[in-house]
Amino acid sequence: MKLTLRVNGIEQTAEADPLQPLARVLREQLNLRGTKIGCGNGECGACTVWVEGEAVCSCLYPAFRAEGCAITTIEGLATPERLTALQQAFIDHGATQCGFCTSGMIMAASALLARNPQPTEADVVHGLTGNICRCTGYRQIIDAVLSVGNKQ
Amino acid sequence: MNAPLREVGRRIPQKGAEQRVSGGAVYTQDIALPGMLHAAVLRSPHAHALISGLDVTAARAAPGVVAVITAEDFPGKPYYQLGGSYSDRHPLARGKVRFYGEEIAAIAAETLEAAQAALKLIEVTYEILPALLTPEAALAPDALPLHEAANMLGGRNLAIRFTCDYGPVQQAFADAAKVFEDEFSHGVAVPACMETNGTVASFDPASGDLTLWTATQAPFFIRKEVAHVVGLDVERVHLRGVEVGGGFGGKSKICEQEALAAMLAVKAQRPVKLILDRREEFISGKTDHAKRIRLRTAIADDGRILARATSLQIDNGAYTAYAPTYVGAARQRTTCLYRVETAHYDCDLVYTNKVPGGQYRGMGAPQMIWAIETHMDKIAAHLGMDPLEYRLRQANQSGDVTPLGWKISSCGQSDCLNEVARRIGWAEKRQGPREATPGKLRGVGIAAMIHPSGGVIYQEGNYSNTRIQMLADGRFVVHTQTADTGTWQNTTLAQIAAEALGVPSELVSVSHMDTDAAPPDLGSAASRVAFVSGNATKRAGEALRAMVARELGRHWNCNPDDLAFAEGKVRSTADPSRMADIAEVAALCGELNAEARYSTPGERPDPATGIGNYAATYVFGAQAAEVEVDMATGQVRILKIVAAQDVGRALNPVAIEGQLYGGILQGIGMALQEELIFEEGRPVNASFLDYKVPRIGDAPPIELALIETNDPEGPFGAKAGAEPTINASIAAIANAVAHATGMRFYELPLSPDRILPKLQAGRKLALKPWKRPYNLEVATVRKAYPAAVFPVLRKIGTKFANTPKQGVKPEIAAPRDIDGLLAALASPNKRTKLLGGGTDLFVGLRQGIYDTELLVDTARVDALRGIALQDDMLHIGAGNTLASLTDSDLVRRILPMLAEGVDLIATPQIRRVATVAGDLCQEKRCWFFRSAFPCYKLGGATCPCFAVQGNNRFHSILGAKRCAAPCPADLAPIFTALGAQAVIIGPNGQRKVAMEDFYQWSGLSCLTAGEVLLRFELPLSARSSHAFEKFAVRRSDFAESSVAVRLDWEAGRITGARIALGAVAPLPIRAEATERALLAAGRPDAKQIRAAAELAVQGSLPLRDNAHKTHLLVNLAERAIRTAIEHAP
Ligand code: FES
Ligand code: FES
């Protein structure tokens, strides 16, 4: 089917099987490869993007449902030259190792901060339950998110 | 060298972090080349079988297919691996498959879908052989040999049988004042990198050059192996740099997809991308090895360790990867950790029909140290000594020579032990009360470790070459063939280079993995980069600096020896007016390159004994853990870990701290929750849902101390750091659990199914299975299962299995109102399913448990949504997302228990899309069913239930007849306890069904064809109170047990009770006996609550592995009732 999406503020069209996961449409057709696929089954959060402002697993989100939706991916948050406070905090706290989980972590954590700008540690842990990181042990990620919350 | 360090030791940010946080880092899965094909792999569905026929004709002719390869297409050489008899595996199976998931053929096609579809056209004829699934089975005298005799030097099905005494061990045991002897065992843990294995290969037929982008730790070995098996000159194989999403050993040597992608690219003469999916990664990726450890420790009166004897049995899996080095690594710990006077080590490396083991962080050290440290605790207790004090007495010291011949140079072991003890509050917590909070047991444990720094001597030796390039603009590039898999090595190597060059690290970048740009290096594994490649980088930096000095000396007409490099400037010490910025210097000198080599001075160990001082230096460390064990659930919660590691020198403290956090959490996973479960040789928990890598909620506070001993051989004093961070974690945790509970557990992981029954051993529950009459029949059938029922159903019954059709591509209907919905559902002759959030459906379609032809989307039907208060009822539309319930102020206000309960379901991302009806109607989560075993649930009445004999830890304890899968929906017990009514609409109009009648005993819902759940109506009362208790190992997991309670009150007395049990039976079950007991008591006291809760398990008939669920259920019921009483209006 022909899809019309508003991705990172820009209207885009793509041709996709209606049940193709949004993650693949973004990655393969729109060349937005910052969204990663770690499991393809909604279990790891690496593919987290926002659909209409809500963080979802794009690996389980069927293309046909995204029709006409506003989608934000990691590429839409900022550029390497102009990072968001959270992205900068990830760098400053050493919250990235291999980086494979990072896009999804940042999309999930940004969604969390949008709803709850002053999260407690428990809120951060609860909000990032859906994102697996095998490298960092999560400590530096928690610190990074909390540091942004405290600043706001 | 006594100048203060400027770059080494700086907390600089990770190189490449900007790309990582903004989505710009390019991993193998992100590579797209013009004309690139996509590949898929045909894998064995059997653990052991002969391939008597293999026909790929139809697949070759399939649409979009460009190349199909089988074993025939390779020149016929097995992988080198460690050479000789260990060279036992071909890239594709030749005539025989030896494990479930083994690669048989691979296809490259225009799209991934086309490649996958073509796989189904390959015809394979198997002659199934008996599978040897345990080392015991493989070592039985009549066991079939898995390999040629030439590959089994240790004897039948033994890749290795090693035995050696280090000193007069017999005498030591004879002289011992006391001997401790125990057996430890554990299953398979896996690295589970977030990036699965994958490769992009491109072949240029004109030049014969093959280029690879691959997720690996070791370009050197990939190149060597791929060239060998594909039949190319090693010079013709080129690796390019790419980001690698985690390694941990799992990507440290060839992983089969590299050779397959390469051969497909050669055949297709087009680029090929082959990325494993998560399930493939779990079933075929490199794993740790399962082991059985028999440990005997002989001590003298004063506690000196006279001898430590270890008998080890390692499950090799079907092929030998680098397990021989694993045999050696396990030996290191038992002969070298603490002062040991003599030692014995014997080890069998046994072939089985399981996925081949590989390498995983620590190479067995975490479990070996767990065994050793258990004995250290036991010895201390025997001597009446504090465990810390005993360890300090036995600690390794500089100048020691271990029985294995290790010469200990710099050694921070005692410092590390003291440091972690101090920080955890050892003295006080060791004495303190164990049950500080009622029902929770606290304890502290401690453990130490030893690890060689760059200690593996390969056939090639252990060397590194690094080239550093000065660009004409004054920036520097370090070229290394190692691979930064997330360890920050590219950051720390830049710091080493910068230090050696006297320039800021900001001017230095690292280009990794590129075999054309960088000289040979053995790669990022075996704790070698910081030390070995670090030394090569330091030397290359020094060489380049000397080269620049010579060049500049020529230009400035001065003696190069007078030139000083510091802080990005060069000045002449002879003539202070002579000074220039490095950028000016570079502009003057032009591009320069220097290359240097470092080879470890370690000795190659004696092959017969393993004796030798083969690392230049050794890493030490200690960890202390404080844990709390919940007596009601058996869950071990880690309150805190303190780790100290002798890092020699912290090249970048942020980097090594990150490695410690990450390594420790992986150790926690191994200790408490990770294990790959096999059935018929096939992993059944091949997903992040069922294989429990730690999630963020499992990360405890961790405190770190970096001990700097400034190693004389290390680059600027550094030792290896990343790998051994995991080593002491299991041991520290297990010792803390022992301190807390007074009990020892000899199997890993320390999960509630192991711990809870022992904790509750004193509390016998009256299960009274006869209370449910069908249990007699169930018990009789189960008894006959192993010998009669299962074999017949498995062998004959499954031939008649009616399993879902594979590869059905469903159509979609997206109605906008109820009428449209009902009309779509009424589509004749179509297998239809309603689509809610799709979080079960899309996964199930892939798992092969659904063969839906028409998906009827509910998302646009507004009548299915909404939350409203009507009279004394809360109406909840069946199509509401779970998040809409937790977001609803109304729900939070009037039924907080519902909002809190829903908040425990799955993850935030899933709750955003998953619906109420979807939660209630999702399929069972039994791992045999979800792995598409031909089971009763999947294939129908002629098929067996695999849970009767297989690992049934999560299955039903109540009410199971032919299928033991429990109801996974948390909303099921919650709605049942709340007394909800389901409003159902169908072709014949609406009907209402009480929640307790919604499910049938099979666990299926009462919805008939064409019916839809419209909404739920929850009665509200100001006179009731509620509670919900759920237990799952990780917060987002499906419940292991749950209990929902609603109590009605009048004048302080219970006048109504509804208690529903979740996840213990095929459907939510009312605990009627418990309810009656509470009503009778009216105002129950603690004892009556407990007695009532115990009635909840009446009629249970647990399976082999889930007895813990009976205790769990009772304890959760007790907790939930207590909470509901506390909340009485
Ligand atoms: S890739 Fe989507 S959740 Fe893992
Ligand atoms: S940084 Fe590697 S998975 Fe998170």
Image: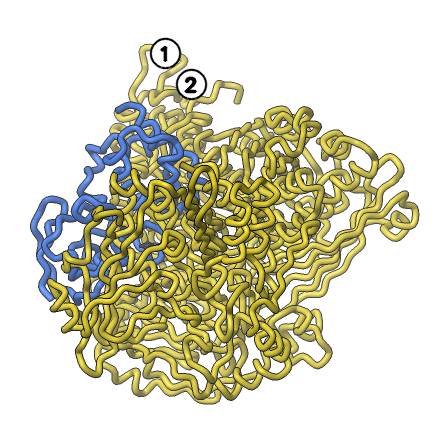
In the rendered structure, find residue B562 and report the number of the disc placed on it: 2
Give the residue at x 85% y 48%: B179
The answer to whether residue B1032 is left or right of residue B325 is: left
Looking at the picture, how far across and down is residue B106, in whole percent?
36, 74
Q: Kindly check if marks 1 and 2 are in contact, taking CB atoms under 8 A apart as contact.
A: yes
Which residue is tagged 1?
B575
The blue-tinted chain is: A
Q: CA distance from mark 1 to mark 2?
A: 9 Å
Q: Position of residue B153 (x, y in %)?
A: 68, 71
In the image, what residue type sits under mark 1? Answer: Asp
Helix, strand or loop at label 2? It is helix
Quadrant of the picture in which ligand 2 is shown: top left
B987 above or below B1020? below
Tell which subunit mark 1 falls on.
B
Asked which quadrant contains residue B206, the reply is bottom left
Residue B148's tag is none
